[in-house]
Amino acid sequence: MIKATGKARKTRVVVDIDGQRRELFAVEERKNGDVMLYVKWSRQMSTADGADHEDLTEQRFSIHVSPKSAGHTIKQTVKSSKATTTTSALVLPNEVRRKTQGGIYSDKERFFCWPVYMERPPRLDSGRYDCKPKPADQILSLGVMKPTLSNVVYMVVVTYPNVSTIEEVRGRTLVQTIGFEKFNVHIVYGFSLAPSVPFGHFLTFTTGPQLDEGQSPPSRRRPHRSYGMRAIEGEFYRGFGILRDRYRTQMEQGDPEAQKEQLDFFWTLSAICVASPPRSGADILPLVD
């Protein structure tokens, strides 16, 4: 875990490609304890319902301490050349009891855990993914990746600080944690063996009623219950399957003349997640034998 408390700075999460840092997102904590996630946007990224957002100018999430609420509001804001869309979810912490060695349950402890979003980014060769840190920023690298051989797939999970780590998913993922005063941010990530392509896909876990005029106020939104650790693993694999299927669909739409055997091969590769990205083509072949 790396700590990011005490200073108004951002932690920039990157992958290293051909000796260059390519930024996926940045995270910072506000003075009131809210956590902000700034996602590097893409013109070819699609949301959970499959609708493409052209000419995105900004995409961010905010995790609010919400001291006057029973839970925490997680809000997504997407700005495009046409409009600004804001969606949110209210997540309630669970209360758990710890069992002592004598079989007696100790006092209740509040437990908060929620997946914010999951992404298989597009090919990170555009200038919009350049990492340009300020002097006070810190860098968290998810590793070195060759886009001709693989693509990073990651899920961002927010928890209370009492969740110091999240277990890796069956040896197929790694986990990095950024610790703040009010929340911890965990990145659960692995590498799809399909090569990186110009398009990417984005899956949210926090969308709710839009906060526009005529919609229900935040206090009337149906709340979600905080996830347990096992549910996080299930959500990662569910999300990974959705991103895999969208990869194939997009490839079919982008190249209608492509041979079915080629599409099947790349679809098979995209269905495999590994903790360490391959360094050569020889590293891939045994996994799809």
Image (cartoon, grey):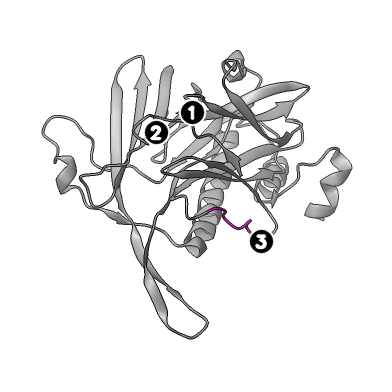
Q: Earlier in the sequence, mark 3 or mark 1?
A: 1
* Left or right: 70 as drawn, with respect to 271: left
Percent position of residue 235, x then y:
49, 55
The span shown in magenta is 164-169
Q: Earlier in the sequence, mark 2 or mark 3?
A: 2
Q: What amino acid is found at the position of numbered circle 1 in the picture?
A: Val
**Measuring 65% from the left and 24% from the top, which residue is drawn there?**
22
Residue drawn at (52%, 26%), measured in percent from left and top? 10
Vertical relation: 79 (above or below) 73: above
Residue at x-position 84% and y-position 48%: 285
Relative height, residue 178 to residue 232 (above, below)? above
Secondary structure of residue under mark 2:
strand
For residue 39, the mark is: 1
| Identity, as a three-letter code, of the amino acid under mark 3 | Arg
- Look at mark 3 in the image and give the residue it sits on: 170
Q: CA distance from mark 3 to mark 1?
A: 27 Å
Q: Residues within 10 Å of mark 2 (few under 14, many from 20)?
A: many
